[in-house]
Image (spheres, rainbow, N blue to C red):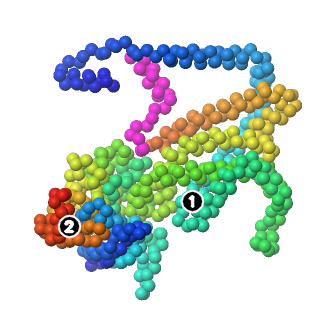
Amino acid sequence: MAQIHVENVNKAHGGKPEAISAIPLRHPGRWVAVAIIALFMAMGLHTVFTNPRFKWSLQWSYFFSAQILHGVSTTLELTVASMAIGVTLGVILAVMRLSSNPIVTGAAWFYIWVFRGTPLLVQLLIWANLGALFPTLSIGLPFGHQFFVKQTFTIIPSVAAALLGLGLNEAAYMAEIVRAGIISVGEGQAEAAASIGMRKMMIMRRIVLPQAMRVIVPPTGNETISMLKSTSLVAYVPYVELLFATQNIYTRNYQIMPLLIMASLWYLGITSILMIGQYYVERYYAKGSSRQLPLTPLQKIKMRISKFGVK
Amino acid sequence: MAELMVSAQKVHKHFGRHEVLKGIDLSVPPGQVVCIIGPSGSGKSTFLRCINHLEKIDAGLIEVDGDLVGYRRKGDKIFELSEREVAERRQRIGMVFQHFNLFPHRTVVENITEGPIKVLKEDRGQVTERAKELLRKVGLSEKENAYPASLSGGQQQRVAIARALAMRPKLMLFDEPTSALDPELVGDVLGVMRSLAEEGMTMIVVTHEIGFAREVGDYLIFMDGGVVVEAGDPRNVIANPQQERTRLFLSKVL
């Protein structure tokens, strides 16, 4: 930076001066840190490769087994479906909370209070055991004749309990995230939209929410990653997902640690893919908010390489 | 067309206990340019916002083109308008804001076409042509696909004027349109407003540009403390203010 500045000043006077060839500042602390971290990494790698109890070959033999793959696909399905429920309901709750009708605001507040105020595992267990409280569910007149009556467990099988538990809980968190996003868009935007005759719903859909996305997307990415891991609680509904499939295997062969590590590797792998997706979605919604879009990692790497090339 | 484009009678407005407007009267015939000047906090912006119902008035009445703002008269009763009706009435009133308020996630041309396409349900192709014509008019033809963040303040404000004009308004409200601009860029925006006035647009302009008020305005209002202190022909009021408060204000801004 300083160099560029000096150059410009000198250009005004004619010739370009020689580039500065100062001795670079030394960073001894960095070398100490590198040494310590390298030591720990070496120790870690050593135990990973030499401790036979990790049983890598056993892990590998189960990694793509039908049971585990079924668990993985259920975990993914639960994540996607629960997030879809959570985001949809969350947007509705956020708009309700910002409504000018106090009853609507209060209802949204109450929902968030209940679903955010109790543990997810407890909520899942309540949905799974709803039949104990309401043995039958029916449709009919309030306090009057019922047209349609069914056993609760037939209407809410474990998959429905899992989705209800995860999705409704997520909606409470998403509502707060969406609300923060909506509030982050300046009032002037809604006023400008109103001044060209737009109605409230259209202002929300076309002007406010698209801008709120920039604030909403990063925490929603976190929520998705968090949801992926929360699906493991569904093993106690019980419903077969990745953790349940893993448990099924280790209760038979007692290889608890190797299989738990294998499951962790699966979770880590999926999380990593989600993180990449999140990066590009964030980049998309940065459109118009900054003059230049940030570089993608690939572009960054290319730039680093070309820089070295010049040196 | 009604005899008066805007007619305000005894308009009162308070925020909580603070009374911002204490009985404002104003009559604007079609084609006239009214400038409102006054110190900050005098209520001039609030009054302007009341005209398109961005603020609700507490007493008095405002009519735009013969229709009550925010209400409907039926017999001797007055009914509050629904959200849809309020929005419909705003279509005929253009507004330009101090901080432009362009939609940052839309390009320049999309900012201008948004209203006609989505609100007036007009044909996209025709609207886009009109938007390009308006951009030529405000001198920004080459910027149609730029995002607002890449424009200077003066350019953004001219796009904002084009966005308001795209709705073919009968009345244009300007809320300190040049107050957030670099001194160098003020002239471009005032130039666009001047040619708009020459075309016969009815305009109410809240401004600190005394020169603009004198040269372009047909009528000048000086407001302070929620009341109209002095009003009249701009050249007379500016050259020869009758009230001490007006004299004091003009001596500071001229």
* Residue positioned 62% across, 15% down in the render: A39
Name the residue carrying label 1. Answer: A97
Q: Residue at x 42, y 62 (%)?
A: A194
Q: Position of residue B249 (x, y in %)?
A: 20, 62
Q: Chain of mark 1?
A: A
- Image quadrant in which you'd find residue A89: bottom right
Q: Are marks 2 and 1 on the same chain?
A: no
- Quickly name the residue at label 2: B245
Query: In the image, is residue A51 above or below residue A230?
Result: above
The chain under label 2 reads: B
Callout in the foreground (2, 1): 2
Placement of the N terminus of chain A among the 4 image quadrants: top left
What amino acid is at disc 1? Arg
Magenta stretch, residue numbers? A288-311
Residue B22 location, x and y as percent?
A: 32, 73
From the viewer's perspective, is A123 left or right of B78?
right
Q: Which mark is residue B78?
A: none
Q: Nearer the viewer, residue A185 or B10?
A: B10
Give the amino acid type for the residue marked by disc 2 in the picture. Arg
Q: Quadrant of residue B59?
A: bottom left
What residue sits 69% from the left and 33% below the top?
A: A267
* Rendering coords of residue B118 (x, y %): 44, 60
Residue A309 covered by magenta stretch: yes
Few, some or many C-alpha atoms within 10 Å of disc 2 (few <14, some 14-19, many ≥20)? some
